[in-house]
């Protein structure tokens, strides 16, 4: 009986450990923000969509918008990691008219594929609906 109780209690503890971070806004994840900054991403991207005083659009799409656009899209993390590593095509721009940049240059000189995948996973988690 005692063993059963202990196991139950342990289960409850680990459940609450798992669910707590999901409640926090992932945009405040300082480890990911640092990785994005040190990899050069934040030169062109911000997390939040922000209207510029001069009415200009950002170079790259704000990551909250990226998260909304690909919410629930199958294999989005894999596809977007490849785009981040190898760059996007200016002939099939996904954000045409919404951003200032015509295409994203390859980032493979600045970031490992494992870190890019981690960042993309985090970016996709920014839509907390
Ligand atoms: C020199 C500017 C620049 C840098 C640096 C940059 N990006 Fe981008 N990024 C863009 C532009 C421009 C687009 C929009 C491409 C398009 O319209 O298809 C984009 C698109 C994206 C997208 C969405 C792709 C899609 O097809 O919808 C993701 C995710 C992304 N960037 C992540 C990153 C990450 C992570 C880094 C850092 C490792 C990074 N970007 C660095 C300019 C940049």
Image (spheres, rainbow, N blue to C red):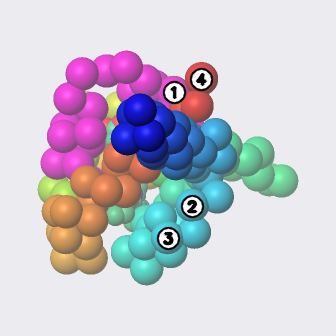
User: Which secondary structure, mark 4?
Assistant: loop
Q: Which residue is mark 1?
A: 68
Q: Residue at x 27, y 32 (%)?
A: 76
Q: Is residue 82 magenta?
A: yes
Magenta part, dominant SS: helix
Depth check, mark 1 against mark 3: the one in front is 3
Q: Which residue is mark 3?
A: 31
Q: Which residue is mark 2?
A: 29
Q: Position of residue 44 (x, y in %)?
A: 50, 61
> For the residue with label 1, is its CB less than 8 Å from the closest atom of ligand 1?
no
User: Which of the two discs, 3 and 4, labels the residue nearer the N terminus?
Assistant: 3
Q: What is the span of residues highlighted in magenta in the rendered image?
A: 64-84
Spatial separation of the CA atoms under disc 1 and disc 3: 22 Å
Spatial separation of the CA atoms under disc 4 and disc 1: 9 Å
Q: Residue at x 59, y 23 (%)?
A: 129
Q: Which residue is mark 4?
A: 129
Q: Position of residue 55 (x, y in %)?
A: 76, 46
Depth check, mark 1 against mark 2: the one in front is 2
Q: Residue at x 51, y 40 (%)?
A: 9
Spatial separation of the CA atoms under disc 3 and disc 4: 22 Å
Spatial separation of the CA atoms under disc 1 and disc 2: 18 Å
Q: Residue at x 19, y 37 (%)?
A: 79
Is 84 situated left or right of 48 in this image? left
């Amino acid at each position: 009986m005692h063993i059963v109780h202990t196991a139950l209690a342990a289960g409850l503890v680990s459940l609450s450990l798992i669910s707590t971070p999901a409640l926090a806004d992932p945009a405040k994840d300082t480890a990911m923000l640092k990785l994005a900054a040190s990899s050069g991403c934040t030169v062109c991207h911000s997390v939040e969509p922000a209207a510029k005083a001069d009415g200009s659009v950002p170079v790259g799409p704000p990551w909250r918008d990226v998260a909304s656009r690909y919410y629930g899209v199958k294999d989005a993390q894999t596809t977007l990691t490849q785009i981040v590593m190898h760059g996007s095509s200016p002939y099939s721009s996904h954000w045409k008219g919404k951003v200032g940049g015509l295409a994203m240059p390859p980032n493979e000189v600045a970031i490992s594929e494992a870190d890019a995948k981690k960042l993309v996973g985090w970016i996709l988690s920014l839509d907390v609906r």
